[in-house]
Amino acid sequence: MKKHFVLDTNVLLHDPHSLFAFEEHEVVVPIYVIEEIDTFKRDLSELGRAARTVGRLLDQLRAEGKLAEGIPTEQGGLIRVAFTANELPASLATGNSVDNRIIAVALESRQANPDAPVILVSKDVNLRIRADAMGLLAEDYDAERVEITDLYSGVVEIEKSGEEIDRFYSTGSLSLPDPYFCPNEFVHLKNPLNPSQTALGKIDLTGERIVPIMRMKDGVWGIRPRNKEQAFALDLLMNDNIKLVTFVGKAGTGKTLLAIAAGLQKTAEEGVYQRILVSRPIMPLGRDIGYLPGDIEEKVSPWMQPIYDNIEFLMGLSKGDKRSGRSSRELIDLGILQIEPLTYIRGRSIPNQYMIVDEAQNLTPHEVKTIVTRAGDGTKLIFTGDPYQIDNPYIDSTNNGLVHLVNRFKAEKIAGHVTLQKGERSELAELASNLL
C-alpha cells in the first residue's frame, strides 16, 4: 500500500536527499517548510548548505512538472508541495505557528487519502507528540538509526579453557570459534572456571585466528594503558595500517590524551607523519569565529584549550620537564603540531598527516563525510567523542556523525573502533560521570 509522508523542516535540513528516501511512496512537502528553509539559505553554515541544496533539488523537480500536482520519482514515488486551503482546526489555531500548519497539511492529506497511511516525519520530538495527540502517525527520520546501547563496541568477550589461554600465550595464536567478527575487533579471553586467567587479543580475519595485541613495554610518549580498553586503543593508534580510528567514551576515559600521545610518538619521534592536525567543531560546524578578538589562532584558543591542556601534560610542563626542551608552542613553530577549527576544512586535501577530530559527537553524518573525504595518501584520522554529551540541537545520541561513522566502517579492514568504559582522570571525575 502506498503511504504518504509529510516532511518537517528539520528532516530536510538534516538530509536534503531525504526527498528521495521513501521509495515508491508519496512525499509531501508543506509550503511552510519551504518558507522556513528559505530563512537559512544565506547562512555560511551546514544548515545554509542544506537549505540551498533543498532549493536546488526542488527547482530541478519543478522543471519536470508542477510541484502542486506531484513529480514522479525513479523509484515510482511522488514528490509534491502542498499547503492547507482550509482554516486551521480550532485545536491548532492558537499561535498559528509553522508546526501547526505542518500538522494541518498532514491532517488534510489524511482526509484526502482515507484509505492510505499518512505519516508525519519529524526530528522534533515535541512535534511528534503533538501529531500523535491529533491522531496522526508520527516517526523520526534516520536512514540508519543505531541506538547508542546497541552501538558496536569493538570488543568481544570469549570464554576459553585454561589450556587454550595458555596455548594462546605460548604460540601467539588461537583459532576463531566462528567467522562472524569484524576486522580489527578486539577480544577479551576469559576462563569461566578461573576469572583471573585472562588474555587480550584481536581478530585476524585473514588467518581466521586471534592474535596478541601490540605490546608497548615503555608506553607511548610516557603514557601506559591503565585498562584493557586503553590497551586496545593504543594498538589501533600505533598500527599504521589502520587509517581510521574511532573512540567513544565518557569524560575522563583518556580518548583525547591517548590519541595525542600516539600522534606525538608517530610524528615527533618516528617521523611517520609530517604533522599532527588537531581540530574540534566550533558549534555548530561552519559557524564563523570572527566575533572573537585577535587573529585565527587567538580566536580558536578558547575552543582548543582542552587540546593544549593535554599536550602540555604530555610534554611534562606541569612537572617542569619540557621533554627535551620542547613545549606546545615550539611544536607549533616547528610545524609538528597544527591546531585549527573545522570551519575551513572544506575543499582541502590533507596528505601524510595524523589528524585528530575531538568532540566528534557534535558533527552530523554529512560533516563527518566532508572531513573523511579530505584525507590524502598516508593520512590517519582519529575521531573521539561522547554521544551522551551533544551540544548540537539538530542531532542526538543516535544520529550524530560519530555513531554513523562507527556503524558504517566497522566492517572495513582499514578502520578500528573501541568504546572506552572506565574513567581514569581521577576518582572524583569517575564518580561524577557515573552519579551526576
Image: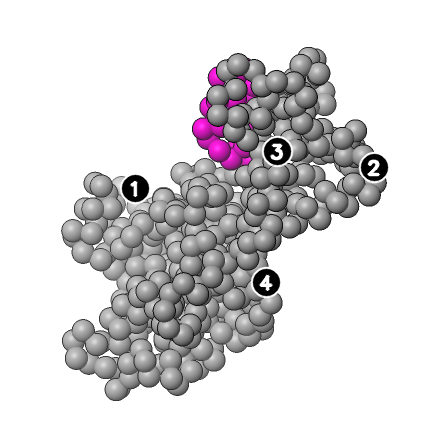
Residue drawn where x is 61% and y is 33% of the image: 32
Numbered disc 4: secondary structure: loop
Query: Contact (CB < 8 A) between labels 3 and 1?
Result: no
State which mark lies toward you, 4 or 1. Answer: 4
Q: Earlier in the sequence, mark 3 or mark 1?
A: 3
Q: Nearer the viewer, mark 3 or mark 4?
A: 3
Q: Nearer the viewer, mark 2 or mark 1?
A: 2
Does the residue at mark 2 contact the one at mark 1 (Cβ under 8 Å)?
Answer: no
Residue sitting nearer the eye, 258 or 80 = 80
Q: Quarter of the image containing the C terminus?
A: top left
How far across and how far down the image is residue 340, in percent?
43, 69
Question: Closer to the camera: disc 2 or disc 3?
Answer: 3
Q: Residues within 10 Å of mark 3 (few under 14, many from 20)?
A: many
For the residues labelled 2 and 1, the Cα–Cα distance comes to: 67 Å
Residue assigned mark 3: 32
At label 1, the amino acid type is Pro
Q: Which residues are magenta?
A: 122-142
Secondary element at image label 2? loop
